[in-house]
Image (spheres, rainbow, N blue to C red):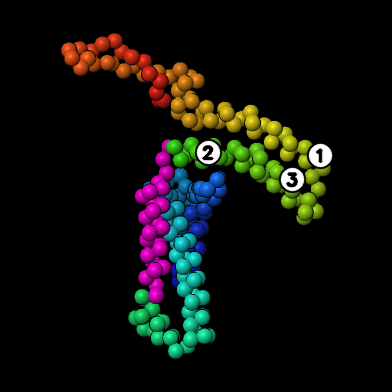
Amino acid sequence: MFAMVYSLIEVLTFPVMFCKGRSLCIASDGPFSSYRPIGVPLVSLYCGSFGMCISLLALHFFYRYIAVCKPDKLYYFEGKRIIYTLIPCYTILVIWTSNVYFLMSIDAEKEAIYQYTLLPLFTMYLPAGCFIILPIFGIELGAEANKTGAFIGVYPALDPLIAILLIKEFRSFIFCQKKSLAKVSTTTGRVDKPASTFQAT
C-alpha cells in the first residue's frame, strides 16, 4: 500500500535532483510545480516518503531474516505487535518531511542558487556527458562533437554574468542602485542630510 502511495507522490511531484558539492537540490517539475501551496509540501512529503521507503525495505529484510533464521521470534510481527515495528518508519517519515518543509523551505536565495547551478548543467555536464556516453552505444556524433568544446568555452563567459544578475549585492553595485537613508542625530534629534547606500531593489 505504501509503495502505491509513494509512486503517486512521485508522479505528482516529478522530482528533479541536482547535486553540487555536499548539497542536494530537489525541485518539482510536476503538475503543481507552479503552485507553491501544493508543490512545496509535495516535495517535502516526497523526501519523507523516500526515507520511509528505505526504512520499510530494511524492515522487510529484517522480517526475512527472522522468518528464515529465527522463526521462533516471528511473534514480533503478529497481531498488534506489527504496529510497533512500523513506528520507526513513520517516525522517519514525519521527521524528514518536517525537516525539509520547515528548515529547508524555498526562498529567493535558494532559487537564485538553483538557477545559477543550471548554467554548468547545460553548458558543461550535459554536453561532456553526451560526448563520452553516446559513442559507447554506437551513436556517432560526427562534426556535432565540436559543439561540446564550444559549450564548455561559453561557460566561463556566462558564469560571471549570471552571478551579477542573480546575486543582489553584485547587481546593486554594478547598476549603481542606491537608497537614501536619513541620519538622525542622537543628541539633537534632528534629521541630517540623507546618506546614500547601495541596496537591491
Distance of label 2 from label 3 (alpha carbons): 24 Å
Magenta span: 85-108
- The structure residue drawn at horizontal position 53% and vertical position 30%, both measured from the top left corner, is 163
Mark 2 or 3, nearer chain start: 2
Q: Is residue 139 above or below residue 151?
A: below
Mark 1 Cα-neighbour bin, 10 Å: few <14, some 14–19, many ≥20: few
**Quadrant occupied by the N terminus:** bottom left
Mark 3 Cα-neighbour bin, 10 Å: few <14, some 14–19, many ≥20: many
Helix, strand or loop at label 3? It is helix
Label for residue 143? Answer: 1
- Residue 72 placed where, x, y %? 44, 89
Distance of label 1 from label 2 (alpha carbons): 30 Å
- The structure residue drawn at horizontal position 52% and vertical position 54%, both measured from the top left corner, is 14
Write down the quadrant of residue 136 in the picture.
bottom right
Which residue is farthest top?
A: 193
Mark 2 Cα-neighbour bin, 10 Å: few <14, some 14–19, many ≥20: few
Helix, strand or loop at label 2? It is helix
Which residue is farthest bottom?
A: 72
Helix, strand or loop at label 1? It is helix
Which amino acid type corresponds to the residue marked 1 in the rendered image? Ala
Q: Are marks 3 and 1 in contact (CB under 8 Å)?
A: no
**Quadrant occupied by the C terminus:** top left
- Residue 200 placed where, x, y %? 41, 25
Q: Is residue 186 magenta?
A: no
Please give the residue where the numbered disc 3 appears in the rendered image.
131
Q: Are marks 2 and 3 in contact (CB under 8 Å)?
A: no
- The structure residue drawn at horizontal position 43% and vertical position 85%, both measured from the top left corner, is 74
Which amino acid type corresponds to the residue marked 2 in the rendered image? Gln
Q: Is residue 93 above or below residue 138?
A: below
Please give the residue where the numbered disc 2 appears in the rendered image.
115
